[in-house]
Amino acid sequence: MEWAEVCIDPNLKGLPYKIELDQWGQIVMSPATVHHVLLQNAIADLLKALSSNGKALLKLPIQTAENVKVPDVVWLSPERYELIKHSAVSPMAPEICIEVQSPGNTLAQMMHKKDLFLAAGAKEFWLCDDSGKLSFYEANGVIENSRLVQEMPIPCNILLD
């Protein structure tokens, strides 16, 4: 299946799942809990507050080496935004791709997504665990804090109201 087909399929509209495509074009759906969604929104809000020169978005479809993947939150510069804003699927990853780890995801799965997003052009990958603790990665491995959002507190724990 191609991403354009997923986008127009009436049977897939309104599902309470994150939809991605695996390397064989098969649909992968991940259910989200309220806690997961609250963490996503809190991260996006924090990015918006700390970085006024880019855009924080939820669930941007990105073409990767293994088909379309959809990180929970992304941050992209105005330049990348202009390059992708009319695309059905982004041909490149935004500068920052963020995943909120669900109980059904292993760390190995998250690190595989990290590798896919970095290979697709992301500069950083952030992983938020279930407690709200953020960890930061770039191509060379773990970093103490974001280099792109230098105002990010260290350590960074996303707190929910």
Image: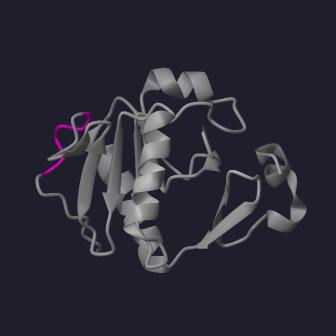
39, 6: nearer the viewer: 6
Q: Which residue is found at the position 61% from the left and 28% from the top?
A: 84
In the depicted structure, whether residue 146 falls above or below residue 134: above
Residue 155: percent from left, percent from top = 12, 57
Query: Quadrant where the C terminus lies?
Result: bottom left
What type of secondary structure mainly makes up the magenta span? loop
Q: Residue furthest right?
A: 10
Residue 52: percent from left, percent from top = 32, 34
Residue 145: percent from left, percent from top = 17, 45
Q: Which residue is found at the position 47% from the left and 20% from the top?
A: 79
In the depicted structure, whether residue 74 falls above or below residue 6: above
User: From the viewer's perspective, is 11 left or right of 31?
Assistant: right
Q: Which residue is found at the position 54% from the left and 74% from the top?
A: 32
User: From the viewer's perspective, is 126 left or right of 70?
Assistant: left
124, 14: nearer the viewer: 124
55, 68: nearer the viewer: 68
Query: Which stretch did the figure color magenta?
Result: 148-153
